[in-house]
Image (cartoon, rainbow, N blue to C red):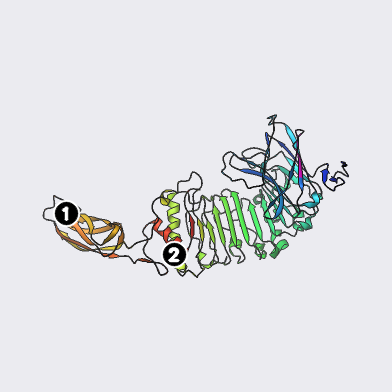
Amino acid sequence: MSIRRAVNGWMTRNVNNKIVGSIYSLRILHTGNNFPENIYSNNVSTLTLRFSQATTVRISWGDGSFDTYNTFLDSGVHSFTLYKKGPSTSFTVPAGWTNRKAYADNNSSLLRTVIFYFDTNLLVGLEISTIKINTQSLALANAPNLANLNLSNLSNAASQLSGALTGIDFNNFVPSNLTTFSAVTVFVTASIYNTVIPDVVFTMPLTSLGLGGNHHQKTFAESKFDRIGPVFGAALTSFTMQIAFTDAQGLPSNFSLLTGLKMFGHYNVGGTYSQLPAVIRAMASIERYDISYATSYNRTGDISANVNLKAMNFNNVTGWQGEVPVGLQNCTLLQTMSFQGSLSTDAKLSNFINNFFLFIQANASMVPGATKFRNLTIDASSSVGGNANAIAQGVYRDPKVNVQTITLTNGGSGYTKAPTVSFNGGLNTNGTSATATAVVSGGKVTAITLTYSGYDYGSVPTIVFTPDQADTSAIGAAASATLSQPYVQGSSNGNPATHREKIWVLVNQYNHLWAYRAT
């Protein structure tokens, strides 16, 4: 026998101590043919509930139908995730996720209230990301053990990040339990929280804070940004923002009080910073940068003080030109670098490969037991539809001995047209010949230019000048060649002449893992 009834508007249990009903635990207003509904065709919309133990989640979809779901283990946490995958994304949906509700009436203008029923005493995390919902204040029933609240990219309109929340009802939270709070581009423009950090945030013992909105339109005192450093101090380990601060604004100087900050993220902003904020670059504690869709960044600035940096992710940062960050030689703990979508032209990718190879050659050890700038993971791939593919085609091979220099030793006489330059002999069985061109002036060869270094020479070739057929009296031009050092595992990189050879050396000599094709 079971007994179903509501007590003070909260969850009740039957005689077997199982959840049977409640007035609500979480309510969301929306219009659309699905819940959740995508903002963009290339995004994945998600709503995730995390619990301290296995439980069930019952959903009233706002059309008279109900469904009940069991939680699943996600990295050891009992979770329920509801999602909708946009038609233009190749995202691979993790096991355990539940696909969106598709409404049979196909009425996209009908306002519906979606209600989630669960034991709020078990709720430890709530995450809502990139969902189109109606304008509302977030209403969550009493959640005394909620520790993580992550809200990002909510919108009351399709194809734009306009915000959707007028506020958050903090009355049913216990702020002293919250260690993670993120509200990134979730508030409508008219909400005070779109430009000002709620006072209640400063009562939370946060280790992770994320903010997004129009805080750049206020002074640091007005937006309360200048309270972040003094209030959270060494306890805050992660700070992310989606705010269009400028180089001139920077960040408050008292961010220097965040002496335990390990991760700094800046996302989805237009013409703002051209480089990382100086106060962040000065922090020895920083271990990770996550910068994405921040189109104005074109460099990092000097990061020599970030001596504990392990990961540097500058993804879809289209202003990036392929530089190696200034001061990177001090970041000897570095493990990963990602510029996915940021090197989306051949010129940018070429610039990065050339610069990075020279940096590694100058700063990393060839000895397998060493760790400094060895064993790195490098992602230089272009975004879908990018055009940084030409360098990735062809054969990746070790840099065999090639012609490194050529020197004109005699200009000869009787030349009216440039002679053909050829390299005779010296090649190993599978080698390819070097090529060069000559310049004639005043009857003499005055210059010779190496146009291709060749591949796999065993000995120095002889350079031969063959005059044009009309130059019957031309004679005497001569030049000499020198060869590069051979590639030797553990002691010499040789002289890689192409991007493919440079990547081969980085992978084989320094044990790097590279991604360089279109994603």
Considering depth in this image, is 110 or 367 the residue closer to the camera? 367
Pick out the residue farthest to the front: 1
Compared with residue 385, is residue 407 higher up or lower down, i.e. above or below? below
Measuring from the top left, give residue 291's x and y in whole percent: 58, 54
Crowd class of label 1 (few under 14; some 14 to 19; many from 20; radius 10 Å)? many
Amino acid type of the residue that numbered disc 2 sits on in the rendered structure? Gln
Q: How many marks?
A: 2
| The N terminus sits in image quarter | top right
- Three-letter amino acid code at the position of disc 1: Pro
Q: Which mark is residue 467?
A: 1
Secondary structure category for the residue under label 2: helix
Q: Residue furthest left?
A: 473
Q: Residue 355: where, in percent of width, then height?
A: 44, 60
Q: Is residue 359 left or right of residue 86?
A: left
State which quadrant residue 21 falls in.
top right
Residue linked to disc 2: 509
Q: Which residues are magenta?
A: 57-66
Q: Is residue 476 above or below residue 91?
A: below
Return the disc, 1 or 2, that comes first in the chain's sequence. 1
Please give the name of the residue rendered at 41% of the width and 67% of the height, measured from the top-left corner: 489
Would residue 420 be counted in the magenta stretch? no
Q: Decide: marks 1, 2 in contact (CB < 8 A)?
A: no
